[in-house]
Amino acid sequence: MAFLCRSAASLLKSPRAAPAVLSACRLYSSGGQYEYILVEKRGEKSDVGFIQLNRPKALNALCDGLMKELKQALDVFEADGEVGAIVITGSDRAFAAGADIKEMQNKTFQDCYRGDFLAHWNRVSQSKKPVIAAVNGFALGGGCELAMMCDIIYAGEKAQFGQPEILLGTIPGLVSKVYPVDQLVSEAVKCGEKIAANSKLVSAMAKEAVNAAFEMTLAEGNHFEKRLFHATFATGDQKEGMTAFVEKRKASFQDS
Ligand SMILES: C[C@@H](CO)C(=O)SCCNC(=O)CCNC(=O)[C@H](O)C(C)(C)COP(=O)(O)OP(=O)(O)OC[C@H]1O[C@@H](n2cnc3c(N)ncnc32)[C@H](O)[C@@H]1OP(=O)(O)O
């Protein structure tokens, strides 16, 4: 948080940063100049910053360009003295279906590690102003995490939250459910079968991240999880999982 405050303050004070903020202000006052998001001020007093993710054909998959624009819009709203709260939403069908799998498919571990892939995704949790997620439809993987980074989540009746990364050969992917007594054991076995059909190597990495988090601060846990996520890009199973998604077929994991 201290870092955030400093970075926001430096945006406001630094003469070099000021033009960036001003030009970003123009972006939402003139409207329509972002490619992947819609940005405006709402509310009777125009005191609510409103950001709508807008990649309908890709179910608002969070491509790099979208995340950069989201950061830019948050910077603008943080610098705007009128804005007291920020709402992030998607479409009726999807809040966001996760990180962009087509962009990630061919990334290597080296690409992820060198570029500190997804490091800037924490921007939302660093906002000094309260952020409300208004979630309709799919909120999966990074989309679910984006909602969780907000301070408040309002969900539509058909919202679906999930962490399906394990299906792509990467982490995380843990789900919990409640069942009637007589169905519990068979449903638990079915769940075990689903987990066992995924990469055993990557499942172990997901468990390692969760277990390690119990012994760490939140920042350390996030960092460790991100590094393990990067490490999945060194596996054949991540390549298989993401390629299978793009080729619209079932993945065949080799635990390698
Ligand atoms: C890195 C971590 C963060 O920690 C991640 O976020 S990994 C990504 C996690 N998310 C997922 O695994 C969800 C992937 N999407 C789906 O499973 C399905 O698309 C669905 C959300 C269940 C919806 O299925 P439906 O059959 O209704 O629609 P389509 O699959 O035909 O999707 C329509 C269109 O959107 C593209 N798309 C959907 N999700 C993504 C994505 N995450 N990245 C890139 N593109 C995505 C999909 O490919 C279709 O486009 P088309 O290929 O037809 O041009």
Image (cartoon, grey):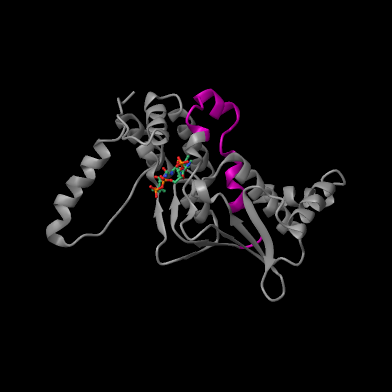
Q: Where residue 131 sits: x, y (%)?
A: 60, 61
Question: Residue at the location (70% across, 54% down)?
Answer: 32
Q: Is residue 97 visible?
A: yes
Let me know if residue 17 is in the magenta part: no
Let me know if residue 113 is in the magenta part: yes
Answer left or right for 204 relative to 92. left
The range drawn in magenta is 103-130
Residue furthest bottom in the image: 44
Q: Residue 13 or 247: which is nearer the viewer?
A: 247
Q: Is residue 127 visible?
A: no
Q: Where residue 70 sits: x, y (%)?
A: 64, 50
Q: Residue 121 or 70: which is nearer the viewer?
A: 70
Q: Where residue 157 sits: x, y (%)?
A: 40, 67
Rendering quadrant holding ligand 1: top left
**Based on the displayed image, in which of its 4 quarters is residue 210 positioned?**
top left
Residue furthest right in the image: 15
Q: Is residue 208 above or below residue 86?
A: above
Question: Residue at the location (41% across, 30% down)?
Answer: 243
Answer left or right for 94 relative to 35. left
Answer left or right for 233 relative to 197. right
Q: Quadrant of the C terminus?
A: top left
Q: Is residue 231 above or below residue 24?
A: above
Question: Residue at the location (51% across, 48% down)?
Answer: 57
Q: Residue 202 or 248: which is nearer the viewer?
A: 248
